[in-house]
Amino acid sequence: MVKVKVAPPQRGEVRIKHVAVALCHTDAYTLDGHDPEGLFPSILGHEASAIVESVGEGVTEFKPGDHVIPCYQAYCGECKFCKRQDVNLCTSVRASTGKGVMANDGQSRFTYEDKPIYHFMGTSSFSEYGVVHAQSLAKIRRDAPLEKVCLLGCGISTGWGAVWNTAKVERGATAAVFGMGAVGLSVVEGLVKAGASKIIAVDLLPSKLNLAKKWGATDVVNPQALPEGQSVQAEIVEMTGFGADYTFDCTGNVQVMRSALEASARGWGESVVIGVAAGGQEISTRPFQLVTGRSWKGTAFGGFKSKPQVPMLVDLYMSGELKIDEYITHEMPFAKINEAFELLHKGECLRCVLKF
Ligand code: NAD
Ligand code: AHE
Ligand code: ZN
């Protein structure tokens, strides 16, 4: 660990003190060099909770002491994308966050030994203090436990939203979910809440399939345990008749994305890509799969509009309607972050919460 300097917030910016941060697979993916937008040196991290320390000129919606969740999908409420009811891809600061800098002056607020360090996803939560755009913060109620609700900054919000906002799964539908990390399990949770009649969980690890059953999956499939020559998509087509109404990729593996598309129902099946694939990877299938009525979709942050909707997700957790605690398999001081990455790589943890 090193000491970095975090400059004061400029116009439209907020300096925050992080309380807790969890690791998402996307942090590992970027650290391992798979993200075409990954810049180094940078401060990663995007699933956090924080308290406002100071605000820059012109910021009136936040004050020191406010509890917040940093959101990599920003929300300005004014751009073409924010104005559309069903879209969350705000453009207000996206070009700058993709370049690892702040929109105000195109510079970073982090320095180490007088050299700039890039921001990441407009959040950079692996740092005790950080500076973010006001558009990238959702203010939340004070009684919500910050060491739990940090998870709403990415993984589990994404899974629930993929079911409710992106696929809009209806009661009685059938579904298959590929990859039982925190994202896949939250898809399963979302499907249970939506009233899906059959939920098929797919993973290579028996331990993850056991968790899927606990979360409410009705069936599990381990592709490595299938008879030779039987593909996972063929298995799911057999289990459901003509394929599942909805399928979800939560692995980031483009072969799995293909299996998920081909496991969706002939005529109306929808397959949602959630996993993030490495730079240079492309998806493919026989166009006949689309001609015969399947469609491919994707989702970022589960389609939630961050600033207005993250506080609503906090309310759902506080009223016991949605789980968060069950996804937290490990807790550690922030200094042990490298151990947390090892656990994620080994498939031994869903979410490890690091406390500052
Ligand atoms: P994770 O590493 O905790 O879970 C991935 C799971 O997939 C593991 O259980 C692993 O065993 C399983 N898996 C790997 N290869 C598989 C295969 N061939 N077949 C079946 N299962 C397989 O990751 P996570 O944090 O849950 O994230 C899942 C994916 O979602 C990642 O790609 C991440 O980058 C992405 N993600 C996307 C968004 C978004 O907004 N679109 C948000 C969060 C995470
Ligand atoms: N930067 C990468 C893609 C990374 C990516 O797709 N990120 C997801 C969120 S993953 C969170 O764990 C996302 O929301 N993307 C939309 C966006 O605007 O970043 C690349 O391929 O360039
Ligand atoms: Zn994430």
Image (tube, rainbow, N blue to C red):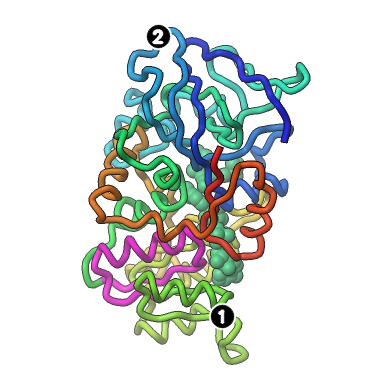
Q: Residue at x 40, y 18 (%)?
A: 64
Q: Residue furthest top?
A: 57
* Amino acid type, callout 1: Pro
Give the amino acid at mark 2. Answer: Gly
In reply to whether residue 253 is colored magenta, the answer given is no
- The image quarter containing residue 258 is bottom right
Image quarter hosting the C terminus: top right
Q: Helix, strand, or loop for circle 2?
A: loop
Q: Which residue is mark 2?
A: 58
Looking at the rendering, the stretch of residues picked out in magenta corresponds to: 173-200
Q: Nearer the viewer, mark 1 or mark 2?
A: 2
Figure quadrant, ligand 1: bottom right
Residue 269 in percent (x, y) is at: 36, 68
What is the quadrant of residue 330 in the picture?
Answer: bottom right
Residue 223's label in the rendered image is 1
Q: Mark 1 CB in 8 Å range of ligand 1?
A: yes
- Quick one: quadrant of the N terminus? top right
| Residue found at x 35% / y 84% | 241
Name the residue rendered at 37%, 38% in the picture.
88
> Residue 267: x percent and y percent?
33, 71
Q: Is residue 13 left or right of residue 324?
A: right
What is the x, y in percent for residue 311? 30, 38
- Pointers 1 and 2 in contact (C-beta within 8 Å): no
Residue placed most toward the observer, 286 or 21: 21
Q: How many marks?
A: 2
Q: Is residue 300 visible?
A: no
Q: Position of residue 185 (x, y in %)?
A: 43, 64
Query: Does label 1 or label 2 sit earlier along the sequence?
Result: 2
Can residue 281 be seen here? The reply is yes
